[in-house]
Structures are given as C-alpha cells and as structure tokens.
Image (tube, rainbow, N blue to C red):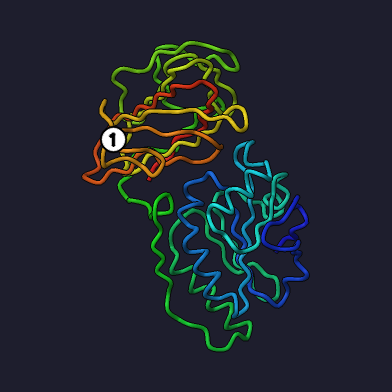
Amino acid sequence: MPDLGGAVGWLNSSPLDRDSLIGKVVLADIWTYSCINSLRQLPYLKDWYEKYKDAGLVVIGVHSPEFRFEKDQENVERAVHGLELDYPIAIDSKMGIWQAFNNEYWPADYFVDGKGRIRYHHFGEGEYDQSERVIQQLLKENGAGQVDQTLVKPSGEGIEAPYSMDVRSPETYAGYLRTDHFSSQERIAPDSVKTYSPPKNPGLNEWGLGGSWKVSDESAALQAPNGKNVFRFHARDLHMVLGPIEPNKSAHYSVKLDGEPPGENHGVDTSTLGSGEVNQPRLYQLIRQKGQVTDRTFEIEFTDPGVQAYSFTFG
C-alpha cells in the first residue's frame, strides 16, 4: 500500500500512515462526495466498518475531488457530517494519494492485508459480496479468530439507494471540456456569456441550455434569471451536481417531467410541485420515478441567477 502522506488533512481521526497500519486489515476507498457511484456504495462501507472494526478492519475514505469545489475542506466536512460517516477520512485535495495509488476511478476500493500488501481491488459499484468475502479472508489470515461469515444487507435510501439496472443515459458534463450531445441551436461559446435556446425536441441523451449562461471548463454558470437545462433521458433517477456561484447564497428552481410537475416522481431534493433550492455545492436528486422507466424529457428552470451546473448523473 502506498503511504498516505499526500493527505492535506484528516476527519474523524488523527493522521494515519502506512507503518502505523501494519497489523491491520485496511480498506482504502477513494471517493468524492458529489459522485453518485461513490454515494451508492456508502451503505456497505458503513456496515463493514461497524461489523468488522473490532476484528481489526480499518476503513479509510480517501476523498479525492473531481470538481474544484470538492477541494474545499469545509465542503468536505459538511458532506461527511451529512452522510454520517464515522470512519477516518483522508482529505486528498491535492490528489497525492490518488497519484500514489495510480488510481483512475471513483469509487476505487483497495483491500490491504496485515502485512501492508494490496491483495484485491474493485473499481466502481457492485460485487459487494465478493468484496466482503475478501475482508473476511484477510481478517482470518490476520488472526482475527471467529469472523462472522454472514454478509451485510444494507438498505440504502434516498440518494444512497441501489442502482436501478434500467439506465440508458450516461453521465453528462455541463462544462465544455467533457460535454457531449449538446443540442441547443447555438454552439457553446467557451468562457463567454451567451444566450442559448433550449432544444424543443431533443433525442435520447441530448441536452441543452436556455437563457444567459457562461460555460467554463467544468460547469455552466447562469448569468440572468429564468435559465434552463433540458435533458432527454432514460433512467429511474436523474441527479445534477449543482452549486451557488457565491458562498452563502441560494438559487431556487422548478423541475418538470414531460412538461408537467413531477408529482410522485420527485426526488429527495424536489417537491411534488417540482420546487427546490440550491444552497451548497453537491449532488441533488431531482427525479426518482415510481413507475415504468421510459424515455422522458427533464427540464429545470432556475428563477435566480448565480447557480452553476456541473453534471447530470443517472440511476
């Protein structure tokens, strides 16, 4: 296992290093708090930590940011508190630990035996039973004695609920460096304020802007009231990573699904009428469909300027 000296800070623990962890089984989870794939894995990490910590398992969350706002320690602290994470969190805002592991994924789980050797890794969600069997085996090898051989069955709720398995829409970014399938009539003007027309009949996985926006490398920032994002998608859940441009300010929004308020298909961050508020940079769950998953057109209108849209994710 690489050393953890690249951390710029620690939450829930004094600083940990490789030498002090010899003799322990370590699960190092590289994650970031606005990533839906990372969030849906958390119920398993929480349960493994509680179940096996007395047998010698150390769970370490390595928070390696994807977006610039995730480098801010106050934002990370708020997220960790809200997610009720009690295990040690290494704040990897300079990506030192990420680079030491030669990592390329969120989430990425590295399983380390009592001698400090990485024995198994898993990238992305899923295969939780296999991962837990690895934990059990490494604990037994490390002399833990009787290790409970049952498997945890967490019940993730809200944003942490399991993947729906009927998803035909990919993660899509609003910033010009990584965006795809942009279908407003106007072409994106990088780093410039421009007025866009929302697409009227977007095809599946096409999206666009409406109103006055400034599109930068990683986000689109609304410059005037009543700006829109439109996306034609196929999934149970639709999330957006959103944040206010200025700290301690908020922006209100209204969501529609096929031109109507979402009703029972609202997400945890949206009312049945479609209303909600962006008050901190994070992932917002805007749609969770209760019935059959079909192609739907999502629209979000921000009544206030000063909001940044980073990405769409699905589940």
- Residue in view at x 51 percent, y 17 percent: 213
Q: Is residue 257 left or right of residue 55?
A: left
Q: Amino acid at mark 1?
A: Pro
Query: For this rendering, which residue is in front, 20 or 241?
Result: 241
Q: Is residue 21 left or right of residue 257?
A: right
Q: Is residue 65 above or below residue 195?
A: below
Query: How far from the left and from the top, in percent, is residue 28?
Result: 62, 62
Query: For this rendering, which residue is in front, 238 or 73?
Result: 73
SS of the residue at dot 1? loop
Quadrant where the image shows the N terminus:
bottom right
Q: Is residue 51 left or right of residue 10?
A: left
According to the picture, the residue beneath numbered tag 1 turns out to be 262
Query: For this rendering, which residue is in front, 288 or 66?
Result: 288
The image quadrant that residue 203 belongs to is top left
- Residue in view at x 52 percent, y 77 percent: 136
Q: Is residue 123 above or below residue 314?
A: below
